[in-house]
Image: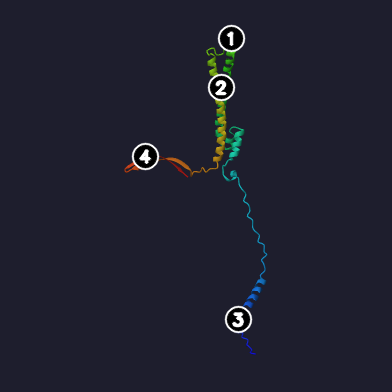
Amino acid sequence: MEVVPFRLRSPHWFRVVFIILLLLTGQKTFSQVEPDTTIVEQQVPEEEEELSDEERIPGYKDPNKALLFSLLVPGGGQVYNEKVWKVPLIYGGILTSIYFLEFNNRRYKRFIDALDIIRDPSSPPEANPFPNLNQDGIIRNVNFWRRNRDTMYLVFAGIYALGIVDAFVDAHLSGFDISDDLTLKFEPSVEPLMANTSSIGIALKLKF
């Protein structure tokens, strides 16, 4: 029987030894790695305090408040918007409409009474407060003064509504930029039309 001599220099043995050492080294390395259990605290950013428009914008007025004050009292929204000079205009228009409403209503009632007198067969002719007018003339006056009275109702409601709209819009505009950088002005302008011909006029310029 022939004995095969053991050769350590065989390349197969080197591969086997290398793989065993690699496995042992890797196992030792993995066994020494410990999981990191450190808890990292997240810093929650502090919530910034939200400011209202009245606190953030100088001179800002709340449109809803202006609308409410105008509904409750005529001119209340203008006082809230610090536009007190508009209050006499609103009350002047309201009082004027009330005066003409009452005047037209009073004339309407006089002609209504006169019409009732004429239509009453038992009333004498001299009972007519308007002797120069017949029944048709009195009816025309009744319709005329009634239309005037109804028109003054509309005028009164229009002035009241105009005050409400003015206060609401004025409060909205209080949040817009009205600094000196916004300018609107007229300037002379020269524009060329054709060769050796130009046009002279006025230009409206808005600067932002």
Say whether marks 2 and 3 touch (CB < 8 Å). Answer: no
Foreground mark, 2 or 3, reads 3
Residue 112, percent across and down? 58, 17
Q: Which mark is residue 200?
A: 4
Q: Nearer the viewer, residue 29 or 202?
A: 29
- Please tell me which of labels 2 and 4 falls first in the chain: 2
Foreground mark, 1 or 3, reads 3
Q: Is residue 194 left or right of residue 137?
A: left
Please tell me whether residue 122 is drawn above or below residue 65 in the rendered image.
above
For label 4, the SS is strand
Task: Look at mark 2 in the image and give the residue it sits on.
Answer: 146
Could you classify mark 4 by the number of other residues whose Cα lies within 10 Å: few (under 14), some (14-19), or many (20 or more)?
Answer: few
Q: Which mark is residue 41?
A: none
Q: Which mark is residue 12?
A: 3
Say whether marks 2 and 4 touch (CB < 8 Å). Answer: no
Residue 183, percent across and down? 47, 42
Q: Amino acid at mark 2?
A: Arg
Q: Residue furthest front?
A: 1
- Please tell me which of labels 4 and 1 falls first in the chain: 1
Q: CA distance from mark 2 to mark 3?
A: 124 Å
- Please tell me which of labels 1 and 2 falls first in the chain: 1
State which quadrant residue 201 falls in. top left
Placement of the N terminus among the 4 image quadrants? bottom right
Please tell me whether residue 96 is drawn above or below residue 119 in the rendered image.
below
Foreground mark, 4 or 3, reads 3
Q: CA distance from mark 4 to mark 3?
A: 104 Å
Q: CA distance from mark 4 to mark 1?
A: 79 Å
Task: Look at mark 1 in the image and give the residue it sits on.
Answer: 124
Q: Nearer the viewer, residue 167 or 143?
A: 143
